[in-house]
Image (tube, helix red, strand yellow):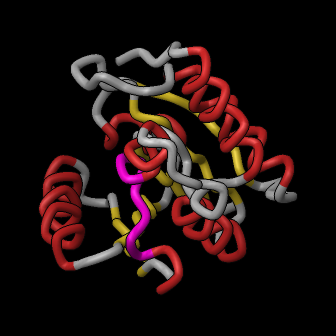
Amino acid sequence: MKTVVCPGSFDPITNGHLDIIQRASGIFDRVIVLVAANQEKHNFFTVQERVEMIRRVAEETGLSNVEVDSDSGLLVNYIQRVGAAAIVKGLRAVSDFEYEFQMSLTNHKLLPECETIFFTTSSRNMYLSSSIVRQVGQLGGDITGFVPPCVYEQIHKKLTTGQSQG
């Protein structure tokens, strides 16, 4: 069974993230979406909220081979622990490639059997990022086309109650 890990902050998960996850789930037996628990970042959603949102999205889109987890340690240690064959990352632009290529080389140096597979984003999602979604949403823009419906509900709820982690 081939397992891959799709890591990220997913704050929140966007339709671009979902596209990469769906494509990976069609190729690999098991996809673990790993929410990065970075205490130094000021996140809009808590780690647990992000994990629950992604689980709900996976369930609603019928991705039965997708699991969701969180971790605050080195990615290569997590990869070893779960026995994953590779890391899956999405690329939107050249700027993504530079950073992700550096991370890929670092991970490979730390764990030589660790491979990174890059999926290019679809053209309809190449402008999307979690920070763009948050910014547009916070300024009152329509983000319904940027995120899955259940995620939109969570963002709308958080914006109207003012409960971001900020």
How far across and how far down the image is residue 47, in percent?
A: 50, 23
Looking at the picture, tell me which residue is in the foreground, 27 or 45.
45
In the picture shown, does residue 143 fall above or below 155? below
Q: Residue at the location (47% across, 86% down)?
A: 123
Looking at the picture, tell me which residue is in the foreground, 156 or 74.
156
Q: Residue at the location (25% across, 50% down)?
A: 111
Left/right placement of residue 161 relative to residue 74 reads right
In the picture shown, does residue 149 fall above or below 120? above
| Residue 99 among magenta residues | no
| Residue 129 among magenta residues | yes
Left/right placement of residue 75 relative to residue 106 reads right
Looking at the picture, tell me which residue is in the foreground, 79 or 118.
118
Q: Residue at the location (43% across, 64% down)?
A: 128
Say which quarter of the image contains residue 106.
Answer: bottom left
Say which quarter of the image contains residue 19.
Answer: bottom right
Q: Residue at the location (71% across, 64% down)?
A: 29
Q: Which region is colored magenta?
A: 126-132
Q: Quadrant of the N terminus?
A: bottom right
How far across and how far down the image is residue 56, in percent?
A: 78, 39
How far across and how far down the image is residue 39, in percent?
A: 29, 17
Name the residue furthest front.
140
